[in-house]
Image (spheres, rainbow, N blue to C red):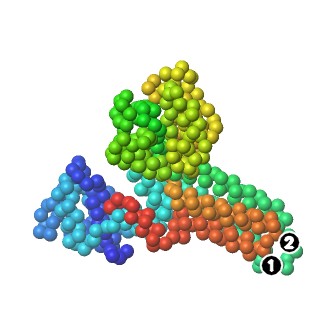
Amino acid sequence: MSANDTIAAIATPAGRGAVGIVRLSGADVRRIARAMLGGVPVARRARHTSFLDARGETIDEGLALYFPAPASFTGEDVLELQGHGGVLVMDLLLRRALELGCRMARPGEFSERAYLNGKMDVAQAEAVADLIDAGTRAAARAAVRSMQGEFSAHIEELGALLTDLRTHVEAAIDFPDEEIDFLAAPAIATRLERVSARFDAIETAAAQGALLREGITVVIAGKPNAGKSSLLNRLTGDEVAIVTPAPGTTRDVLRQHVSLDGLPVNLIDTAGLRRAQDEAEEEGIRRAHAEMQRADRILYVVDASAPDAAAESEANADSAPAAGLPSGVPLTLVMNKIDLTGQPARASAGTPPRIFLSARTGSGMDLLRAHLKSSAGYREADAGALGARRRHLDALERARRLAQSAASGLARRQPFELFAEDLRLAQRALGEITGEVTSEELLGAIFGSFCIGK
């Protein structure tokens, strides 16, 4: 495979549809257009035409759109054939393009070429995929902001501030004989404060974007008949789990996705935690423990009407719970069935926090939803979030630590060279976000996750 190949792919989902699109990009597009269409369409103007096979017979009729380089998505000559969306029709059009010298595009190769040709940076390309995969309106808006370059612009602004600092310190290195106390210059302290403030703002917006994209995984655990499945049904607003008075009804893991004011939540209902009665229940309990290990938060449901409710909640309140809950995973105790105890719905702060509610009546569910959003660090939908991924947050955190190291070294009057090196490494970490600093392995991982034809 070569970056100079002309590539082709079906750009619409597999299956039957009203319209299907075959997309081509590369240096041979004009030649292929003449062979398939009888001529090259006028740039950026839809043309109704016949799509021809090798014998000049019509495969299909539809619209052809031609985008000459460099004013195209990929920065190369691009041709889109919009025909009837039948599986066979799309396959015949693609086969014809391959006969004429195209090769099949790899997943994400159109977007990869757009990046390589300077049409977008890596963060923008990732935002394209995130927009396609967005599960909530807020996630889609955050992805659009990053796709349009807002996230990249913030990173570039932060990089410019670091460059400004490096200019000053490297001037001090280059002219050591000048009687200028660089360390005492108030402008340096002001610049360092601006850098710190920009890190705060960007990390906040990016963290919200990552939360909108990835969401949180919440495992519902507890003893049999505590009301775990009832709680799942109440959170989802549907009867997705079977609820019966018989203990051990839930034998396997049950997954449901919900949106809490734009925050994606992957809810997992698990088998009741007790001594297993048979092999099937034993396997269900094993899976429950495995899911809890991977959770972002555990909702441990306690039957508040049971005689041992207080003892059970206290037993699970320390760092090594008696029920075998994993340490290190945030825990919330859900005191369920308050409709049977006469207690009011309330939220109790502490370690762990407690939410008193009734999954049967819905009393206190608003407190639980608010608690889940707050504990995840989620602000109300949108709130200026920028589409971001975990790797972006990791790079930002490394850059921040290096900038803080530079500031700390400056305060201790360490050599200027160390200050400059920390700033250089901080800029390099920021460059990983936009793709200024990258590797073939990283690009392969990023674009390999895209759809073919995108």
Q: Upstream in the sequence, badge 2 or badge 1?
A: 1
Question: Which residue is under mark 1?
Answer: 175
| Mark 1 neighbour class, 10 Å CA radius: few under 14, some 14 to 19, many 20 or more | few
Q: Position of residue 72 (x, y in %)?
A: 39, 63
Task: Let me know if residue 434 appears in the view.
Answer: yes
Residue 20 placement, left or right of 349: left
Q: Quadrant of residue 351?
A: top right
* Mark 1, secondary structure of its residue: loop
Q: Separation of disc 2 and disc 1 at Cα?
A: 9 Å
Q: Position of residue 285 (x, y in %)?
A: 41, 45
Dot 2 amino acid type:
Ile
Q: Are marks 2 and 1 in contact (CB under 8 Å)?
A: yes
Residue 116 placement, left or right of 187: left
| Mark 2 neighbour class, 10 Å CA radius: few under 14, some 14 to 19, many 20 or more | few
The quarter of the rendered structure image containing the C terminus is: bottom left
Q: Nearer the viewer, residue 73 or 45?
A: 73
Q: Is residue 173 above or below residue 62?
A: below
Question: Which residue is under mark 2?
Answer: 180
Q: Position of residue 430 (x, y in %)?
A: 59, 64
Q: Which disc number belongs to residue 373?
A: none
Q: Position of residue 289 (x, y in %)?
A: 45, 48
Dot 1 amino acid type:
Phe
**Residue in the image at 52% along x and 57% along y:** 390
**Residue in the image at 53% along x and 64% along y:** 434
**Residue in the image at 38% along x and 68% along y:** 76
Residue 394 placement, left or right of 144: right
